[in-house]
Amino acid sequence: MWAMSESVPVPCPACRREHLYAAPSYPCACGAPVAPPLDPHGTMTAVTHRAWDDEWVTVRCAACGRDGQWPRPELGCPCGTVLRIAVATAGTVPEQPTGAVPAQPVGTVPAQPTGAAPHRAFRPVAIRTARDAVTVTARYLRWLGYRDIRRADQRPPSGIGIAARGLLAQVDPTVRPASLRDVECLWLTAMTESAACVYFSLTGYAPDARARADTLGIPLFVLDLTGTPRPVNDPAGELHATGA
């Protein structure tokens, strides 16, 4: 029987506060959840600058042996310090479940609206890793007409942030549905940057998160493993149909 990844103590070097941290799980292409193996004896370092390659770690799936690249574990301390969590050396992986990744929720808005889209058909890319999910999202935003796509300046509490001109997008490749807090944090961050926002999840959304997004007018998409973003609420369906 598989359990959530084990929590490890994480002392903050700035304020000395100690936290307990458990790495999120991500779906391997075979369907088994994979979590980066944490090293409780490793050095936790403060993030002072970011580079794309530093944001990822290679983790092997114990179920199928496939190597995937997933977001490097990080923890935000209330004092403002962002801590990079130490990962165990290759070959140390958590036990995996026999079950598959939760089924993708069916969107209430079709992926291809009956109205003519303002651009040619989107060409999906299969999602096998978290980096693939980010790549698909960036390609989709360009397809919608957004420009200057880049990594967001602020890392969200969960998932990966992508910014474009006038837009903040969040990509959540974990195996849990996006929560109400996830959606509200994205909206608040976008408000401070005077930008619109959109959410992409690999697993779907909690009912209260979906309801709040509808109230705030936030487009919600589900990324299926074929690499196709599927609108799951009216704002997303409208964005898909009309573009940026």
Image (cartoon, rainbow, N blue to C red):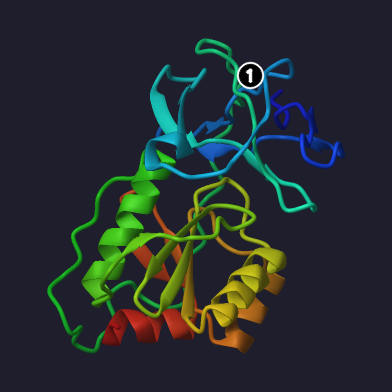
Residue at horizontal 62 percent and vertical 56 percent from the top: 177
In the depicted structure, whether residue 69 falls above or below residue 234: above
According to the image, label 1 marks what residue?
95
The quarter of the displayed image where residue 74 is located:
top right
In the depicted structure, whether residue 116 falls above or below residue 153: below
| Lateral position of residue 169 relative to residue 84, left or right | left
Amino acid type at circle 1 is Glu
Can residue 98 be seen at all in this image of the molecule?
Answer: yes
Residue at horizontal 59 percent and vertical 84 percent from the top: 214
Residue at horizontal 52 percent and vertical 61 percent from the top: 105
Q: In the rendered image, which quarter contains the C terminus?
A: bottom left
* Residue with the most extreme left position: 120
The quarter of the displayed image where residue 67 is located:
top left
Tell me the SS state at disc 1.
loop
In the depicted structure, whether residue 207 falls above or below residue 157: below
In the depicted structure, whether residue 63 falls above or below residue 77: above
| Lateral position of residue 196 relative to residue 41, left or right | left
Residue 211: image location, x then y, percent: 66, 79
Q: In the rendered image, which quarter contains the N terminus?
A: top right
Residue at horizontal 26 percent and vertical 72 percent from the top: 147
